[in-house]
Image (spheres, rainbow, N blue to C red):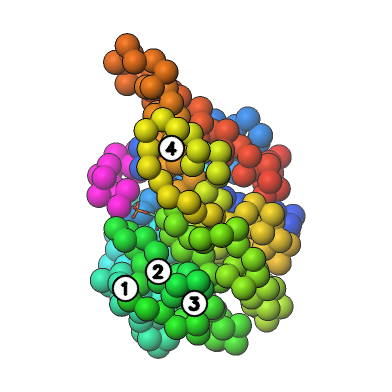
Amino acid sequence: ALISLRQLLDHAAEHGYGMPAYNANNMEQVHSIMEAAAAVDSPVIIQASAGARKYAGEPFLRHNIIAAIEQYPDIPVVLHQDHGSEPAVCLRSIQSGFSSVMMDGSLMPDMKTPASYDYNRDVTAKVSEIAHACGVSVEGELGCLGSLETGMAGEEDGSGAEGQLSHDQLLTDPDEAADFVKNTKCDALAIAIGTSHGAYKFTRPPTGDILAIQRVKEIHARIPDTHLVMHGSSSVPQEWLQIINKYGGDMGETYGVPVEEIQEGIKHGVRKVNIDTDLRMASTGAVRKFLAENPKEFDPRKFLKASTAAMKDLCQARYEAFGCAGMA
Ligand code: G3H
Ligand code: 13P
Ligand code: NA
Ligand code: ZN
């Protein structure tokens, strides 16, 4: 059944678990997310980025998820629109049937220029008013995702601020967060704590100076009733990095957000954990390995099956680690 983000995260808060929110771009990703959830009896959040909607086409993406709901009637599913760049984007998603939208007013509509606090508050409040009238939940974002090591947003192709970010922009302020939630009435708040989108988050296994889980605790202490969201929370598994490189890939040394750090966040109000890169890496690693080991194969179903299985294992591991297994 399709449910709203608010319904799911209220349940998560009540029971002390966190939810991975997986980005999906194609049928195989939707399959893997659902197969894993069915295996461990977890609810599901599937989110569609602007890039995903451009890749698959919004109706193809949406119908994949509608198909998932039909095939798994016992699993609650949130259909979430990731990183809306302006209110109109969110309104179109509401109209097309999403049960949750993110208004990312931390950046201007170009998704590159950091926005002022007042702009962010006003666009997010506007989306909340309309979304709530339709029974749809809203995620806002305060602070800019980016590396505390370099001051850069990270991902070159995707969403993220352009240019150098200050320490203040890279860490969400607890008092500002309280004012933001009060004035926007958003259902969940994405915070900046040093993570960034993509595979290149940290040049070394992160410690507290570059991954500020402490800041999660400070924000949660200030707004204990707000569901917190961690973006850029792929763990960048070293095993998959090695497999990708062993079978012809060329990814550089890099580190992600350790699962134990996410678990620490979940103890302090984190309820939604955005994961995209990990599925991409598992998929690419599995496809590279399969094709290298089976050079005579030319049926795409064979290598896509390997991709789905790898992503399923990863999804299942996160459902178990975040405590949502058994919660469907
Ligand atoms: O927001 C970041 C997600 O990883 C989506 O990335 O825009 O390449 O689909 P994308
Ligand atoms: P990753 O790039 O760490 O998977 O983050 C995804 C994300 O935050 C989507 O909104
Ligand atoms: Na989101
Ligand atoms: Zn994100």
Q: Position of residue 166 (x, y in %)?
A: 45, 83
Q: Residue at x 44, y 53 (%)?
A: 199
What number is the disc on residue 245? Answer: 4
Identify the disc placed on residue 153. Answer: 2
Magenta stretch, main secondary structure, is helix
- Rendered residue at 50%/84% (across/down): 168
Q: In terms of depth relative to the viewer, which is nearer, 254 or 87?
A: 254
Highlighted magenta segment, given as a residue range: 51-68
Q: CA distance from mark 2 to mark 3?
A: 9 Å
Q: Are marks 1 and 4 in contact (CB under 8 Å)?
A: no
Outermost top residue: 296
Question: Disc number at residue 170?
Answer: 3
Give yes or no for contact between labels 3 and 1 (Cβ–Cβ under 8 Å): no
Q: Which residue is mark 1?
A: 162
Q: Closer to us: mark 2 or mark 4? A: 4
Between marks 1 and 4, how big is the CA–CA gap?
Answer: 29 Å
> What's under tag 2, amino acid-wise?
Ala
**Residue type at tag 1:** Glu
Please provide percent x and percent y for residue 214.
68, 73
> Tag 1: Cα neighbours inside 10 Å, few (<14), some, or many (≥20)?
some
